[in-house]
Amino acid sequence: MAQETVNDQVTDAVTQTNVKVLAEAPAQSIAMVYQTSAHSISLAMENAQQAQGGLQQIGNAVTSSAVTMIMNAAKNFESGA
C-alpha cells in the first residue's frame, strides 16, 4: 500500500475541530442539567399553585356551608322563641 501524505492544514483543521467539540461538551452538559432543573422546578411550582387553588375552592365551599348552617340555626332559634 502506498504511503500518502496529508496536507498539514487539513490535519490541523481536523484536530482543531475535535478540540473544539471536546472543549464545548462540559458546558453543554451543565447547560442541559440547568435547563432540566429549571423545568422540573417550574412544574413543581405549577403543581403547588394548582393545589393551592383547589384548597381555596374547598375553603370557600366550607365557609359558605358554615354560614348557611348558622343562618338556618338562627332562623330556627327565632321562630322557636
Image (spheres, helix red, strand yellow):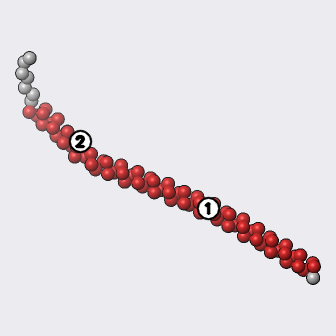
Give the farthest residue toward the right: 80
Q: Which residue is drawn at 56% across and 60% down?
A: 49
**Horizontal and vertical percent for residue 36?**
40, 51
Which residue is identified by label 1?
53
Q: Regarding mark 2 in the picture, which secondary structure is present there? A: helix
As drawn, 75 above or below 58:
below
State the quadrant of the C terminus: bottom right
17, 22: nearer the viewer: 22
Residue 71, image quadrant: bottom right
Asked if residue 44 lies left or right of residue 8, the reply is: right
Residue drawn at (9%, 30%), measured in percent from left and top?
Answer: 7
Q: Is residue 7 above or below residue 25?
A: above
Residue bearing the label numbered 2: 21
* Quarter that holds the N terminus: top left
Asked whether, in this view, residue 55 is left or right of residue 72, the answer is left
Q: Position of residue 4 (x, y in %)?
A: 8, 23
Q: Residue at x 7, y 18 (%)?
A: 2
